[in-house]
Amino acid sequence: EAGVVQSPRYKIIEKKQPVAFWCNPISGHNTLYWYRQNLGQGPELLIRYENEEAVDDSQLPKDRFSAERLKGVDSTLKIQPAELGDSAVYLCASSNRAPNPDTQYFGPGTRLTVL
Amino acid sequence: RKEVEQDPGPFNVPEGATVAFNCTYSNSASQSFFWYRQDCRKEPKLLMSVYSSGNEDGRFTAQLNRASQYISLLIRDSKLSDSATYLCVVSNDYKLSFGAGTTVTVRA
């Protein structure tokens, strides 16, 4: 079974430029998460989707970040405009309600560098 | 105060040694507890769930103390391949909160 797929794996952009990340979760997983992981820290949740509905976006900086999950499968996370402090690894994860909804499977992440 | 606090280490141990470390969590209503493993520049992967009664998975033993709100992980007979960062994770209503991780380096 294929795991969570993310692209691109690496992205280098100038500040104030837009950037987008794409995620394809494990087939059949209803729940999709976007996390940001800064160097030396654990992942921090940005947004959680149940199917196509964003059920928790309280930690998403909505002035510059947006996300969508059309048709409840793939998801895109966008930053516009990017700031220096956005440099981090952006991780996508998915889970299924059964047998254990707490078990999340992570993709390899997108490493973003903002210059 | 962070929701999950861990000793960052690093713990530098020889092969075959036993290493143990803890984390503490602040939300007493937390429902589920886990240890994830993260190799350098890789994604986190579930190592094991943690139960109140304590549980083992091969050389790994996890304990949960709800009264004191701490979770522990013990690795016996350490292998070189155990070198990684171990993330303590606490769940509340399916929202995972991660600690910053404890780095373990096993040397030959």
Image (cartoon, coloured by chain):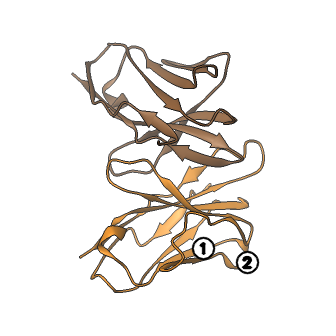
**Left-right relation of A86 to A62:** left
Q: Residue at horizontal 61%, vertical 37%?
A: B27
Q: A88 or B107, which is in the foreground?
A: A88
* Label drawn at residue A71: 2
**Local secondary structure at mark 1:** strand
Q: A96 or B91, which is in the foreground?
A: B91
Label 2 to label 1: alpha-carbon separation: 9 Å
Outermost right residue:
A98
Residue A4: percent from the left, percent from the top? 56, 60
> Where does label 1 land, which residue?
A75
Image-quadrant location for residue B17: top left
- The answer to whether residue B7 is above or below residue A25 is above
Outermost front residue:
B1
**Local secondary structure at mark 2:** helix
Q: Amino acid at mark 2?
A: Lys
- Image chain in orange: A
**Left-right relation of B42 to A31:** left
Q: Amino acid at mark 1?
A: Ser
Q: Residue at horizontal 64%, vertical 22%?
A: B66
Residue B62: percent from the left, percent from the top? 55, 21
Residue B51: percent from the left, percent from the top? 66, 24
- The answer to whether residue B56 is above or below residue B30 is above
Q: Quadrant of the N terminus of chain A?
A: bottom right
Q: Colour of chain B?
A: brown
Q: Residue at horizontal 44%, vertical 61%?
A: A109
- The answer to whether residue A18 is above or below residue B69 is below
Q: Quadrant of the C terminus of chain A?
A: bottom left
Residue A65: percent from the left, percent from the top? 50, 77
* Label drawn at residue B10: none
For label 2, the crowd category at 10 Å Cα-Cα, with few meaning under 14, some 14 to 19 and many 20 or more, is few
- The answer to whether residue A53 is above or below residue B19 is below
> On what subunit does the disc labeled 1 rest?
A
